[in-house]
Image (tube, grey):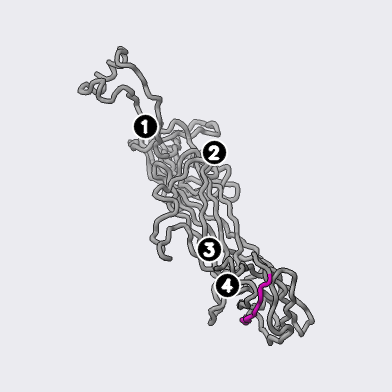
Amino acid sequence: MCKWTETSLIIFKMEAPREKEHLLSLKVMRLPKSSFITTTPVLFEPRDLAGGSIIKDVCPNLGLDDGMQHFSVGQLLMLPQDFGSIYLGETFSSYVSVHNDSQHVVKDILLKTDLQTSSQRLTLSGAGTPAHLELKQAECIDEVIHHEVKELGTHILVCAVFYNTQAGESMYFRKFFKFQVLKPLDVKTKFYNAEDYVSNEVYLEAQIQNITQSPLVMEKVLLEPTAEYKVKELNTIETNGVSNSESTFGNFTYLNPLDTRQYLYCLKAKPLPGTDKPAVIKGVSNIGKLDIVWKTSMGERGRLQTSQLQRMAPGYGDVKLNVTSIPDSITIEKPFQIKCRITSCCERTMDLKLVLNNTENGLMWLGVSGRQLGKLGPGSSMDVELTLLATIPGLQSISGLRLTDTYLKRTYEHDDVAQIFVYSEQVGA
């Protein structure tokens, strides 16, 4: 005999009518969790007859002065009344039962269940399993199937039953049950390229919105980088540069319907083999995948993994120039030094010459212009120290750097490479 568990059972609506009478019947039911139902509070006054009756029947030992003036049913567990919603990343659970409704013994019963999606057909049960020898009157065969939903759109559960009658006739019938898989989360990503003075840094902002109809508890949001990058999560609070594993979102990790939460990650290109210098990544590169795990209010777990996130690396041309050291502020008419790193982004060797052009921006170059820097191989870097003099106070931009490849007679212009604040001696004092 079939035993119904406490888990709620929702009967599917059959899509195809029964073509002929069979000795066996098939029932398919979804196994969702129960849900909370909120009722409207029943308000009354002490002199109301109904109010006094409710108090006496429900809480005979309490009077109207004991906080029962606003009695209500509150939040109770309720068995689902319909099929409910199935979301991508959740586990679809179903109960399948084959029952012998006839007065005859049925032999060699085989139950097979498949799940048809828009792109593939998956066998959930019945493949390679031996048939049941016989099924007597009022007996049944029960199966519970589970499948993690990984596609959006229409899904069709195909249930097929094979059996033989006592007369040796082979019988077969199928039933189809259709349901829709919805999208639970809306994930948007943004990349920010930071001009890091030592290595290339990329900041990834992931915006995750709950588009279901119930709250979700965000259990894990992890960025799994590719082999070219290493990642640092910026969603925990740091004390003295050390993460204490306390989330920036506080103790509440749930997302209400239509709420959005932003996660931030910092990625760095891994150094070249045998060096401490980061690799130069050009063009479109794969960053990694977001792995998102959540739970519903009743503890059902869901998981989504995005496709490879791609980032378009900024174009630096053949040669890249970064300022690696610069003062925060300087005094007017006093020389100061900056350090620059020149990195080759091409596949050939260059012979570089540095030219310093003074512009009308309140900063003047001091030193020799047109000096030879030497040869720079593919992916290699060199450091150069330069001296400037400020003539105008305020926030000034460093410009006028020119690098010329003497092999190809090609000049690379670098303007607005950094900014510096210039103040007078009176303000600084």
Quickly name the residue at label 1: 75
Mark 1, residues whose alpha carbon is within 10 Å: few (<14), some, or many (≥20)? few
Q: Measured along the vertical axis of the image, is residue 251 above or below residue 30?
A: below
What mark, if any, has residue 266 been given in the picture?
3
Residue drawn 50% across the image and 62% down it? 224
4 vs 1, front mark:
4
Mark 2, residues whose alpha carbon is within 10 Å: few (<14), some, or many (≥20)? some
Q: Quadrant of the N terminus?
A: top left
282 vs 204, left or right, is right
Q: Amino acid at mark 2?
A: Lys
First in sequence: mark 3 or mark 1?
1
First in sequence: mark 4 or mark 3?
3
Q: Position of residue 402 (x, y in %)?
A: 73, 77
| Residues drawn in magenta | 380-391
Quickly name the residue at label 4: 327
Q: Amino acid at mark 3?
A: Cys
Residues at discs 2 and 4 in contact (Cβ within 8 Å): no
Q: Give the spatial CA distance, label 1 vs label 2.
A: 32 Å
